[in-house]
Amino acid sequence: MSDCIFCKIVRGDIPSPRVLEGDDWIAIRDINPAAPVHVLVIPKKAIATLNDLAPGDAELVGGLFLIAKRLMKEMGHSDYRTVFNCGPGAQQSVFHLHLHVLAGRSFAWPPG
Ligand code: 5GP
């Protein structure tokens, strides 16, 4: 786990400018954005997927949505999408939990 790309970014081994940072999380821009605004909110704790959550993670993970709300308010977006991909079949590619926050265009439903 500690060698995953987001662990390296969290530790600063790989430089990645922070949009915001808290004690337990960072927010960075996605390197391959799927919308005009595409931020990843990443807990510093290395949790691989939603399937690996423990009850003690509830506050940490729930708090990611409050960060999304704060980011979107600061960036001037009231309409946006938040996504956790869980597992390869749902297109998760980095196995360190992260919340996608996307804005700046219209979104279709259901997602692809
Ligand atoms: P997933 O596919 O796991 O749900 O999302 C991983 C996201 O991380 C992808 O949207 C991908 O573009 C992004 N990503 C992968 N490597 C890096 C990186 O080194 N820096 C940043 N900022 N984003 C990354």
Image: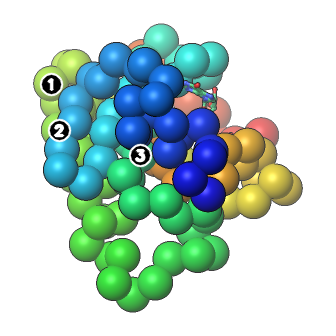
Please name the amino acid that badge 2 sits on. Answer: Arg
The reply to whether the C-beta atoms of the residues labelled 1 and 2 are less than 8 Å apart is yes
Q: Kindly give the residue lying farthest to the right in the view shown.
A: 89
- Of residues 62 and 105, which is closer to you in this image? 62
Precedes in sequence: disc 3 or disc 1 = 3
Q: Position of residue 45 (x, y in %)?
A: 40, 60
Q: Position of residue 31 (x, y in %)?
A: 57, 18
The reply to whether the C-beta atoms of the residues labelled 3 and 2 are less than 8 Å apart is no
Q: Which residue is mark 2?
A: 70
Q: Secondary structure at mark 1?
A: helix
In the rendered image, which quarter contains the C terminus?
Answer: top right
CA neighbours of label 1 inside 10 A, class few (<14), some (14 to 19), many (20+): few
In the rendered image, which quarter contains the N terminus?
Answer: bottom right
In the image, the residue with mark 1 has its CB under 8 Å from the nearest atom of ligand 1:
no
Q: Secondary structure at mark 3?
A: strand
Q: Position of residue 63 (x, y in %)?
A: 25, 60
Which one is closest to the eye, mark 3 or mark 1?
Answer: 3
Name the residue rendered at 25%, 72% in the picture: 59
Q: Which residue is mark 1?
A: 74
- Point out which mark residue 44 bears: none
Q: Does residue 51 appear to the left or right of 7 in the view shown? A: right
